[in-house]
Image: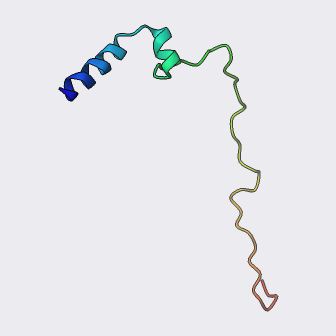
Amino acid sequence: MRTLLVLCVVFGLAACSNVTKETLGIAKKAPNEKLVEERAPLSLPPEFDKRPTVISPTGEE
């Protein structure tokens, strides 16, 4: 009996309009394409491939 009630509630919510789904927080919202900002592509620093110089505790390189 309890399982039948849960199934009825689930299917009832699935059949609701989008307004009801948005109110309950279960509707998917697509992003507004006009509000999406384009960003510049990422870039690497000019000397990214160089390894840092390691100095030993005695002061020698």
Numbered circles on residues, count? 0
- Left or right: 7 with respect to 22? left
> Quadrant of the image for the N terminus?
top left
Foreground of the two, 34 or 14: 14
Residue name at image x 74 percent, y 77 percent: 54
Residue name at image x 50 percent, y 22 percent: 25
Residue 44 point in image, percent of width and height: 71, 48
Which colouring convention does the figure follow?
A: rainbow
Foreground of the two, 2 or 17: 2
Foreground of the two, 19 or 56: 19
- Left or right: 33 with respect to 7? right
- Residue 9 figure quarter: top left
Residue name at image x 66 percent, y 21 percent: 36
Residue name at image x 71 percent, y 43 percent: 43
Q: Residue furthest left?
A: 1
Q: Residue furthest right?
A: 59
Foreground of the two, 31 or 54: 31
- Left or right: 49 with respect to 55? left
Residue 40 point in image, percent of width and height: 72, 32
Residue 3 point in image, percent of width and height: 21, 28
> Quadrant of the image for the C terminus?
bottom right
Q: Residue furthest front?
A: 1
